[in-house]
Amino acid sequence: MKKRTIKKQLALALPLFILSLMTINSFGQPFFKSHPSINPFQYEIVKEETFDHAAVSSAHALASMVGAAIMQDGGNAFDAAIAVQFSLAVVYPQAGNIGGGGFMLARRANGKLIGIDYREAAPANASRDMYLDEKGNPFPLKSTRGASASGIPGSVAGMISIHAYAKLPFAKLIEPAIELAEFGFVISESEAKGLNANRNNFIKYSSAPSAFTKKEKWKAGDTLIQTELALTLKRIQEKGAAGFYEGPTADYIVNEMSHSGGMITLEDLKKYTPKIRKPIEFDYKDHHIISFAPPSSGGILIAQMMKMIAPFDIEKLGHNTVESVSLMVEAQRRAYADRAEHMGDPDFWKVPIKTLISDDYSKQRMSDYLPGIKGSSTSTIAGQIHESEQTTHFSVIDKKGNMVAITTTLNDSYGNKTIVAGAGFILNNEMDDFSIKPGVPNMYGAIGGEANSIQAGKRMLSSMTPTLVTFNNKPYLTIGTPGGTTIPNQVYEGLIDIIDFKKSLKQAIDGPRFHHQWIPDAIGIETGFPEATENALKAMGYSISKRGQFGRMDGVQISSNGKRIAAGDKRGDDSVAGY
Ligand code: GLY
């Protein structure tokens, strides 16, 4: 087990630790008082551990520990997921959220699948060309910065829907987040860096100062207290969805709109509802894969790509060799071309799911694939069909075998950089996930067309790919990652690593990634990608772009003896917990 400790700076450690204990005792923190082993002022990042009964892997150690404690207190994986999502909204403000949205995919121990879509939706006043000037050119930054970029948040309504499958009272599940916001927690170096890097944007795009900006620069070991957010969470604790979508919180959101051209109204908030989506399911080499349906493109993409490569003996081609990578990339090229043309919110656009994930279609798409020859995105267009980077993922498996995978997002890191005055949370910039103009790339370089054009009430196409795997009809794996359009490719590569290349969960999570999304016609490779393969791909004619880190994958797997193996990505502060 690899561990890293996050704590108060040494000189301040003791007095502040004592102060924190006094604070706990004097003001009362029901959750942390009854769980003294979780200390928000000194905690460890645990990258990999095996547990007997239940486990969580998430972007933050405190959130994972909260989720594990909730399960030890008698909660199931759904209870834990709700507590983790709210805790991440406090301790991981760059992507954990109540101002964004997400997807929950679950398999209950009885085999029943549940897909809950709490993706943001376009406000009623949104329209197709809202981000274009009179000449038809996109306004710079309007779909990415400030309230103008925000879709109607879905996370709080999503958590309330998920609670139908939980065992403990909702008030108990949100309590840890309230205490973390009200009394604070110490931040890591990467969080300090993120807050410092976004300081000017927070000031520019918010109507009032917030907890995220202070005079001095943030540093590792500083305490972040979010008083306004604590009050918002308390309103949700007391009133459920109405604590967010109505009353003071709704007023704060609507007031914030006028600062930077936002459109969300009280009516939009009141009307927001999560939707149940039938998961995408397919078989791959003795494994049954379950993933998210539109408005996510993720489930369809991984089904397409895995089916396209299934006829090849990829294990024989070798892990991360030019032969296996070029095969996988050619599947990526074809699937992402289909994404741009055929995928969007299924309530507004007929997505030809059945055809896209059929064996025949996959075969047809690969009919022009020639091993050893680079494909082309000019000649590869979307298939003809005659029907029609910052996000965060966490995984939970409980002692009964309920599996929950949640990917949730504000879209960009710290969303649109607007902190809602009075309410203390960051708003998403999810409107940029729509195709604001056919052929104009969004911030992930993805293009789209009519299927993903803006319409009032429509949900923007996502790449989030919370994924579950069963083996012999038994729960086996829950996995997912952030990373915008790279998400489906990361999950695809992770699954192939585990299933074909027999990598451990941790090896699959940490392995170097590659990404092709049809347009641009280039393979993005991560640091650590084998140089020999990079050179061989170049020799084949591929254009290679070197990228920083891709995503942060978090997963939990059940071993053959029933243990829960949890692994958190080496790329971030991701951490596991369990019992
Ligand atoms: N905002 C990233 C996604 O939904 O794909």
Image (spheres, grey):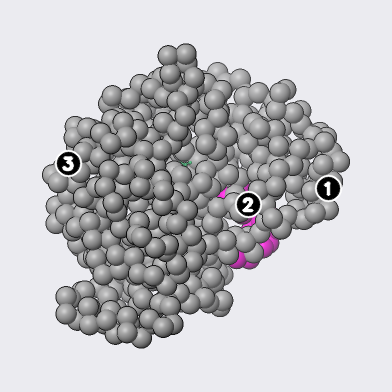
Q: CA distance from mark 3 to mark 1?
A: 56 Å
Q: CA distance from mark 1 to mark 2?
A: 18 Å
Looking at this view, is 390 or 206 the one in front?
Answer: 206
Q: Secondary structure at mark 2?
A: loop
Check the picture and name the quadrant holding the N terminus: bottom right
Secondary structure that dominates the magenta span: helix
Q: Secondary structure at mark 1?
A: helix
- Say which of marks 1 and 2 sits in front: 2
Q: Which sits earlier in the primary sequence, circle 1 or circle 2? A: 1
Name the residue rendered at 70%, 28% in the picture.
377
Residue 387 horizontal side relative to residue 534, left or right: left
Asked whether residue 577 is in view, the answer is no
Circle 2: is it few (<14), some (14-19), or many (20+) Cα within 10 Å?
few
Residue position marked by numbered label 3 in the rendering: 251
Looking at this view, is 133 or 381 the one in front?
Answer: 133
- Where does residue 118 sit, x and y in percent of width and height? 34, 43
- The type of residue carrying mark 3 is Asp
Q: Which residues are magenta?
A: 491-506
Residue position marked by numbered label 2 in the rendering: 548
- Seen as rendered, the residue at the extreme front is 215
Residue 499 lies in the magenta stretch = yes
Residue 349 horizontal side relative to residue 358, left or right: left
Q: Secondary structure at mark 3?
A: helix
- Picture quadrant of residue 371: top right
- The type of residue carrying mark 2 is Gly
Looking at this view, is 567 or 9 the one in front?
Answer: 9
Q: Which sits earlier in the primary sequence, circle 3 or circle 2? A: 3
Residue position marked by numbered label 1 in the rendering: 535
